[in-house]
Amino acid sequence: NWETFPHLPYDVWGSTWILAVGQQGRLIASGRMKDNKGWPVLASDDRGSSWTLSDDFQGVGIEGIQIKCNQAGDFFAIARKVVRDGGRVGDDLVIRKLAAPGAPRIRLSVEPSTLRLSWPGAFSGFIPQSTASLGSDINWLDLEATPVLEGEKWVVTVDPQTEEARFFRLRKP
């Protein structure tokens, strides 16, 4: 079953838009404006529910933007720009890079009988781990608890009496 995607916040020329998917579900959309005044590059870290302007290939003459994501999660955009300089007409390439977002930070809150770990909901697929020491023999263990999505964040609760749970991190399989 196909789900209707939220409308992009621009007056776009529909047939020229492209969508690229990166790590942690980051989406990048780009295409030509109806007024032919640029190619906005939009980013979404919440599965397309909201979009922010990441970059804008401004001006008349931008054509054929392409976007690719590498294994590290970096996005690369390349576009052709028609240049008219006096009587000369030529092409220039415009290349941009959008670095991958780093690993999410864990927030730790203490409640009466539990430690509560949380991180942004846009970062799915991470496994929380703990260790008792940060010495030379670090032994990170996966937490037994399964992360639960609560609103806009993933949450895991940990028993504060557990000896091996002193330091925490997230691991991406």
Image (spheres, grey):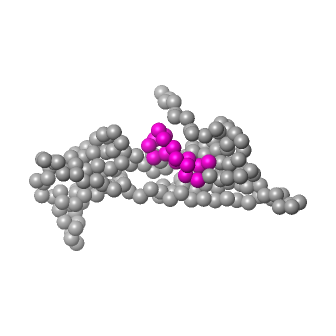
Q: Quadrant of residue 145?
A: top left
Figure check: 139 above or below 23: below
In the rendered image, the vertical position of residue 38 relative to residue 151, given as above or below: below
Residue 21 visible at all? no
Q: Which residue is drawn at 32% across and 50% down?
A: 119
- Residue 52, horizontal then vertical, whole percent: 52, 47
Residue at the extreme top:
1
Q: Pick whichever, 45 or 58, lies toward us.
A: 58
Q: Which residue lies furthest to the bottom in this view?
A: 136
**Residue drawn at 25 percent across, 58 percent down:** 168
Decide if residue 23 is on the left or right side of residue 62.
left
Residue 147: x and y, percent? 28, 44
* Number of callouts: 0
The residue positioned farthest toward the right in the image shown: 87
Is 164 situated left or right of 121 in this image? left
In magenta, the rendered stretch is: 40-55
Q: Is residue 142 magenta?
A: no
Q: Residue sitting at 48 percent across and 41 percent down?
A: 50
Q: Residue at x 52, y 34 (%)?
A: 6
Q: Is residue 54 within the magenta segment?
A: yes
Estimate the x, y position of residue 42 in percent, counting from the top left: 56, 47
The x and y percentages for residue 107 are 28, 53
Q: Quadrant of residue 166?
A: bottom left
Q: In this rendering, would 150 be left or right of 38?
A: left
